[in-house]
């Protein structure tokens, strides 16, 4: 993906679902979404072991989200990613990263 494509995605994005959101500030699954939230994006933490993250209610799976999602950001090992991509398509997300 080139820089122009990435910029285009982020220009249109308001809501980001974060699969693998972490409650540990030293992990990328926490500090990347925290940075994006600081920049004005709404973050939906996706982690079945958390109730909330960054002041937002966490959900167990992408299919538990009841509002439109623009971008799904995945922090998982590569072999675990395909089902999350399928769920992102199922919920109508515009992009997956």
Image: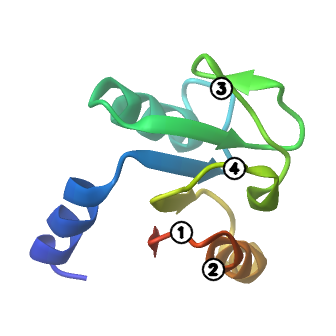
Q: CA distance from mark 4 to mark 1?
A: 17 Å
The residue lying at 66 percent from left, 39 percent from top is: 45
Q: Nearer the viewer, mark 4 or mark 3?
A: 4
Q: Nearer the viewer, mark 3 or mark 2?
A: 2
On screen, residue 72 versus residue 19, left or right, reads: left
Q: Which residue is mark 3?
A: 24
Q: Residue 32: give x, y in percent of width and height.
A: 43, 40
Q: Residue furthest right?
A: 49
Using a 10 Å C-alpha cutoff, classify the residue at mark 3 as few (fewer than 14 neighbours), some (14 to 19) or many (20 or more). few
Using a 10 Å C-alpha cutoff, classify the residue at mark 2 as few (fewer than 14 neighbours), some (14 to 19) or many (20 or more). some
On screen, residue 79 versus residue 17, left or right, reads: right
Q: Nearer the viewer, mark 4 or mark 2?
A: 2
Check disc 2 and report its element: helix, strand or loop: helix
Q: Residue 68: give x, y in percent of width and height.
A: 56, 55
Dot 2 and dot 1 residues touching (CB under 8 Å): yes
Task: Give the answer, above or below, for where 22 lies relative to 94.
Answer: above
Using a 10 Å C-alpha cutoff, classify the residue at mark 1 as few (fewer than 14 neighbours), some (14 to 19) or many (20 or more). some
Check disc 1 and report its element: helix, strand or loop: loop
Mark sitting earlier along the chain (3/2): 3
Residue 63 - label? none
The residue lying at 49 percent from left, 49 percent from top is: 16
Q: Which residue is mark 1?
A: 93
Check disc 4 and report its element: helix, strand or loop: loop
Q: Residue 61: give x, y in percent of width and height.
A: 81, 55
Q: Which residue is mark 4?
A: 20
Dot 4 and dot 3 residues touching (CB under 8 Å): no
Q: Which residue is mark 2?
A: 89
């Amino acid at each position: 993906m080139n820089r122009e494509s990435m910029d285009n995605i982020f220009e249109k994005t308001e809501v980001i679902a974060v699969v693998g959101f972490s409650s540990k500030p030293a992990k990328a699954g926490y500090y990347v979404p925290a940075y994006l939230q600081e920049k004005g994006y709404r973050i939906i933490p996706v982690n079945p072991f958390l109730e909330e993250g960054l002041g937002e209610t966490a959900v167990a799976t992408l299919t538990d989200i009841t509002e439109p999602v623009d971008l799904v950001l995945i922090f998982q090992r590569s072999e675990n990613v395909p089902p999350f991509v399928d769920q992102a398509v199922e919920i109508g997300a515009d992009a997956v990263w």
